[in-house]
Amino acid sequence: EGPIDKVKTPDEIRDEPLPLLNEFEWCTVNVTNQDELEDVFVLLNENYVEDRDASFRFKYTREFFNWSLRSPGWKSEWHVGVRVRATGKLVAFISAIPVDLRVRNNAIRGVEINFLCVHKQLRGKRLTPVLIKEITRRVNKHDIWYALYTSGTVLPSPVSVCRYTHRPLNWSKLHDVGFTHLPSKTTKAQMLATYALPKEPVTKGLRPLQEKDLDEVHALFEKYQERFDLVQSFTREEFNHWFIGGEEQSQNTDPSKKVIYSYVVESPEGKITDFFSFYSLPFTILNNSVHQELGIGYLFYYASDADLAYSDRYDPAATAALKERLNSLINDACIIARNVKMDVFNALTSQDNALFLDDLKFGPGDGFLNFYLFNYKTFPISGGLTDDKSYDAQKRSNVGVVML
Ligand SMILES: Cc1c(C(=O)c2nccn2C)oc2cccc(OCCCNCc3cccnc3)c12
């Protein structure tokens, strides 16, 4: 395990951008400029990842980009675009944000690569490898040599792979748009009853995360994360950005535009015992006359003190304690997501999710998320996959990182 390339220094890295076809030019997108942010928003909304049947396409909002592209330490030069020289039209994009990773016992200063997108009409022109080489050059120039990225497709040597899972919140809409189907010998009424949820969350002491909680929750979270082999370590400032949502979210009042939802459980003694978060990332529905959008909540990071007293997380008593706590917490996350009009709650088989996926009725999806580390070789890390579509509490994952 360890770095693949020999260690280099920034001055060994070329200063000029990589060559492009003459009709195109490199640009650095200034995401604090609303017009340039709009270019990214339009490019991805028309050309980013779709599901296999091209029925849905990710609908990242402007607020989502302000949250995900401007985390502490963000650099405009790492928001790399390709424009058509003659028209200025943005036709490709790729981004990097700085992260502190831990892979087993190794701390790695790296970046997370995301939002790689090439306009549909420019596919097959070998733009993707050039985008990857150019963002690598710009990151190397800042003495950073490692990167974490995910992909729905299989590329050489994933560090881990997790399965998509889905918890229907609005079963009839998912059925209308063809995301879910009516099992044989089952009525719609039975499906609605299966997925019915209480009106309000039930966990005692549950409330939204507030700035005053940050030190305590950050400490609980970093302690909880120690169990995983692949994690992102957060500074206090990063924790504030990712879970309170940065100035972008604290200013905007329109609840329908919220991106990150973070909750804590406060004990009667005033101690924070648990935390969970989920983010909103809708899908545009591509071919339905009635519904335009699918509201989706994605489970993000969470932490609990339920099993911290045990030295072995696989100790049956530790597993039972954490399982009970997570079932209560994540069921409340589903209730809150349904109350803010989300239609489905998505989670992966990563983290300790195998402890609640079955009981909370998360069905296995047909997609997989592969995790990759650039320039860093590791032994495979369990992503919580089992050979059939079930979830196994005893084989739960060692992946702690959650990518947007
Ligand atoms: C994408 C996604 C989907 C769907 O495709 C989906 N849900 C409802 C309907 N559909 C078609 O379901 C998931 C469950 C867990 C985590 C996920 O994604 C994790 C975050 C994805 N990160 C970025 C990314 C983008 C494109 C391809 N791979 C990764 C997903």
Image: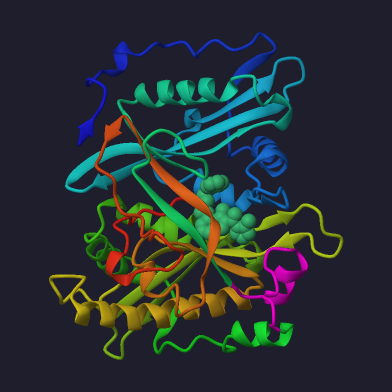
Where's residue 114, x and y in %?
Answer: 50, 40
Which residue corresponds to the image point at 41% horizontal and 83% vertical from the top-left? 328
Q: Nearer the viewer, residue 247 or 51?
A: 51
Figure label count? 0
Where's residue 77, x and y in %?
Answer: 49, 28
Looking at the image, is 250 positioned above or below residue 328?
above
Q: Decide if residue 214 is on the left or right side of residue 193.
A: left
Q: Decide if residue 379 is on the left or right side of residue 70.
A: left
Which residue corresponds to the image point at 51% horizontal and 43% vertical from the top-left? 69
Residue 121 appears in the picture as rendered: yes
Dominant secondary structure of the magenta stretch? Answer: loop
Is residue 231 within the magenta segment?
no
Which residue corresponds to the image point at 73% horizontal and 63% vertical from the top-left? 178
Magenta region, residue range? 168-186
Where's residue 87, x and y in %?
Answer: 77, 20
Looking at the image, is 21 positioned above or below residue 338?
above
Is residue 183 within the magenta segment?
yes
Looking at the image, is 8 positioned above or below residue 283?
above
Which residue corresponds to the image point at 37% horizontal and 52% vertical from the top-left? 238
Q: Nearer the viewer, residue 24 or 183?
A: 183
Q: Quadrant of residue 38?
A: top right
Q: Quadrant of ligand 1?
A: bottom right
Q: Decide if residue 286 is on the left or right side of residue 196.
A: right
Where's residue 109, x and y in %?
Answer: 28, 38
Q: Quadrant of residue 375?
A: top left
Quadrant where the N terminus lies? top left
